[in-house]
Image: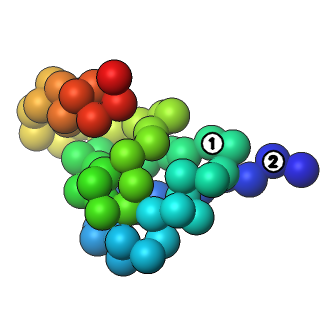
């Protein structure tokens, strides 16, 4: 069985970071506001392009996940 973490755009308690990181796949949304406190791992980013700069999100994630 595979485990997937679907992490919303809101804040995530830092105590959940280890649980998120331990899954087989991590999906985050839009600006990935929880990317530091909710773990760094991001396998898929689902972006709803509503006119916000998508490039800044991707640069942030690339820096966090070399």
Question: How is the rendered protein coloured?
Answer: rainbow
**In the current view of this chain or complex, which residue is farthest to the right?**
1
Q: Is residue 28 visible?
A: yes
Mark 2 secondary-structure assignment: loop
Residue at horizontal 10 percent and vertical 39 percent from the top: 52
Decide if residue 36 is on the left or right side of residue 18. left
Residue contact at pointers 1 and 2, CB within 8 angstroms? yes
Estimate the x, y position of residue 60 in percent, counting from the top left: 19, 34
User: Could you say which quadrant of the image residue 57 lies in?
Assistant: top left
Estimate the x, y position of residue 24 in percent, counting from the top left: 69, 43
Mark 1 secondary-structure assignment: strand
For disc 1, the marked residue is: 25
Asked if 17 appears above or below 14 in the picture, the reply is above
For disc 2, the marked residue is: 2
Residue at horizontal 31 percent and vertical 51 percent from the top: 35
Label 1 vs 2, first from the N-terminus: 2
Estimate the x, y position of residue 28 in percent, counting from the top left: 42, 48
Observer-nearest of 63 and 11: 63
Estimate the x, y position of residue 44 in percent, counting from the top left: 49, 34
Observer-nearest of 47 and 13: 13
Asked if 23 appears above or below 15 in the picture, the reply is above
Label tally: 2
Cα separation between marks 1 and 2: 8 Å
Decide if residue 65 is on the left or right side of residue 52. right
Asked if 41 appears above or below 8 in the picture, the reply is above
Observer-nearest of 17 and 57: 17
């Amino acid at each position: 069985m595979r485990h997937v973490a679907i992490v919303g755009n809101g804040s995530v308690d830092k105590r959940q970071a280890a649980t998120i990181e331990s899954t087989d796949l991590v999906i985050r949304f839009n600006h990935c506001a929880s990317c530091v406190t909710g773990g760094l791992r991001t396998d898929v980013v689902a972006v709803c392009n509503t006119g916000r700069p998508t490039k800044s999100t991707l640069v942030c994630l690339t820096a966090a996940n070399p």
